[in-house]
Image (cartoon, rainbow, N blue to C red):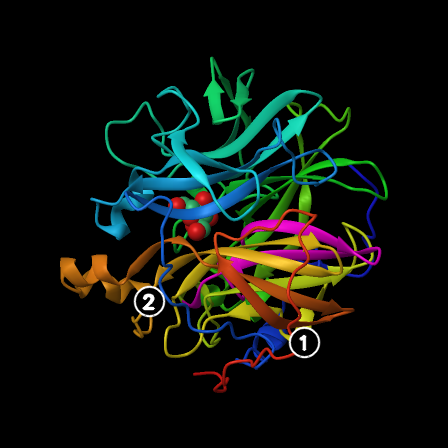
């Protein structure tokens, strides 16, 4: 375990990681800097027969977007668009797309044969290192059980290849699948300890620290909070919301060999799900981003489906919330669920943010309300494809959306993006 500052933060449980506090989250509000424009459906959908949601890029060990014979590769959670959108999490499969120019994407084939771990596969990340592929994912559901269940473990598929020619890219197995991390019950809550909403132990994200050279895997998890804990001033209902950003390291740098370490940040008393955590380095500082939902905030807090972010001087530093509250990107109040699962990545002197087009024209208080709609409405209102990419200016602990690119536009480094001086932020209406 690496050396950590253990003096500053203690509770009845001992050392605590940096916190997303209730007072920070109490400042959450929509602002012109954080609200994305209303999304129009794309003129063309490269994967119209699929529901598409969480998406990530093939990268190298240094976080650069990797190429295979001039093709970049994008991975998405997918399901047949014949299914009701709410059912997609129960059958999710990872498929991949490839592009030469970052605007036209082809493909949509599954990555693995039917031998991936779990009843279905949830989000992950993809590493191309020294000619080898390491496809990290969440094995969701215990495949030895007959019933659908929510057990989660972190897995990797490796040993396979992506082959490419002028016409495209294809996956060549066999892939070997291994479970690499499971919750230890001390730093990371396991299924039996979980009290309120479904626990989380998922969304592995590979990150090599450019300062220290340390090899890390970030993930979404929950912090166990014992019944006699003094956290949340003893308020048990609040303490059921115990999301954290977990981390494991690989002492040898081997992408298959991981040891759990204490969380980088926790949101105990604030939020249950700190999803798809990832880090972007800017000006030598560490920007830690994750997505979260309106309905996973603890009682008494009002938040949004949004991208949240923190900044510190090192990976295990004293994280401070961006923009005072942590909110970086959210949806307009008129369409609060229009996008989700944001992924930030550096592009020249800005940060781009990719996400998926979720429920448009649905203005309920929670996504739970979706299930009460007719099947036709549920289908009509689900985007199920990639959203327009957002452009973010980042200075110290402040961020500002300053433009958008088209749906599915993930520019290659040669592309000069248009000026955004004319960008008009949408009107932001308080905390509605
Ligand atoms: C976020 C998420 C991920 C998970 C996936 C399941 O959109 O909840 O945390 O891997 O969706 O479908």
Dot 1: what SS? helix
- Foreground mark, 1 or 2, reads 2
Q: Residue at x 30, y 71 (%)?
A: 361
Mark 1 lies on residue: 324
Pick the front one: 185 or 211 = 211
Measuring 48% from the left and 83% from the top, which residue is drawn there? 431
Disc 2 under 8 Å from ligand 1? The reply is no
Q: Is residue 383 visible?
A: yes
Q: Is residue 346 left or right of residue 283?
A: left
| Residue at the spot 47% in from the left edge and 76% down from the top edge | 302
Answer with the quarter of the image where residue 208 lies. top right
Q: Is residue 308 magenta?
A: no
Local packing at callout 1 (Cα closer than 10 Å; few below 14, some 14-19, many 20+) is: some
Point out the stretch of residues depicted in magenta. Answer: 269-294
Q: Secondary structure at mark 2?
A: loop
> What secondary structure is the magenta-colored segment mainly?
strand
């Amino acid at each position: 375990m690496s050396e950590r500052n253990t003096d500053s933060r203690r509770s009845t449980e001992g050392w605590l990681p940096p916190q997303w506090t209730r007072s920070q989250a109490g400042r959450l509000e929509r602002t012109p800097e954080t609200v994305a424009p209303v999304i129009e459906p794309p003129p063309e959908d490269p994967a119209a027969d699929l529901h598409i949601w969480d998406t990530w890029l093939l990268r190298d060990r240094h976080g650069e977007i990797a190429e295979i014979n001039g093709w970049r590769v994008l991975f998405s959670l997918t399901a047949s668009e014949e299914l009701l959108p709410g059912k997609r999490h129960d059958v999710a499969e990872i498929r991949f797309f490839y592009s030469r120019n970052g605007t036209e994407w082809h493909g949509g084939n599954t990555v693995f044969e039917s031998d991936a771990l779990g009843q279905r596969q949830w989000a992950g990340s993809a590493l191309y290192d020294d000619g080898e592929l390491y496809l990290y994912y969440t094995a969701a559901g215990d495949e030895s059980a007959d019933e659908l269940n929510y057990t989660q473990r972190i897995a990797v598929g490796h040993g396979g290849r992506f082959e490419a020619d002028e016409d495209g890219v294809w996956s060549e197995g066999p892939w070997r699948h291994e479970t690499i991390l499971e919750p230890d019950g001390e730093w990371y809550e396991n299924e039996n300890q979980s009290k309120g909403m479904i626990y989380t132990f998922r969304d592995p994200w590979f990150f090599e620290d450019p300062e220290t050279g340390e090899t890390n895997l970030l993930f979404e998890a929950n912090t166990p909070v014992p019944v006699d804990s003094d956290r949340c001033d003893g308020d048990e209902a609040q303490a059921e919301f115990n999301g954290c950003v977990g981390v494991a390291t690989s002492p040898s740098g081997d992408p298959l060999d991981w040891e759990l370490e204490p969380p980088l940040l926790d949101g105990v008393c604030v939020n249950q799900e700190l999803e798809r955590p990832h880090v972007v380095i800017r000006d030598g500082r560490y920007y830690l981003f994750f997505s979260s939902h309106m309905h996973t905030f603890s009682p008494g807090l009002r938040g949004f489906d949004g991208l949240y972010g923190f900044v510190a001087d090192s990976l295990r530093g004293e994280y401070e919330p961006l923009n005072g509250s942590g909110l970086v990107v959210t949806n307009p109040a008129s369409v609060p669920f229009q996008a989700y699962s944001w992924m930030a990545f550096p592009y020249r002197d800005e940060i781009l943010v990719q996400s998926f087009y979720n429920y448009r024209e649905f203005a309920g208080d929670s996504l739970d309300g979706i299930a009460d709609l007719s099947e036709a409405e549920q289908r009509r209102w689900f985007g199920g494809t990639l959203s327009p990419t957002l452009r973010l200016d980042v200075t110290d602990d402040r961020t500002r959306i300053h433009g958008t690119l088209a749906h599915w536009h993930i520019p290659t480094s040669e592309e000069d993006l248009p000026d955004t001086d004319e960008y008009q932020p949408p009107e932001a209406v308080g905390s509605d």
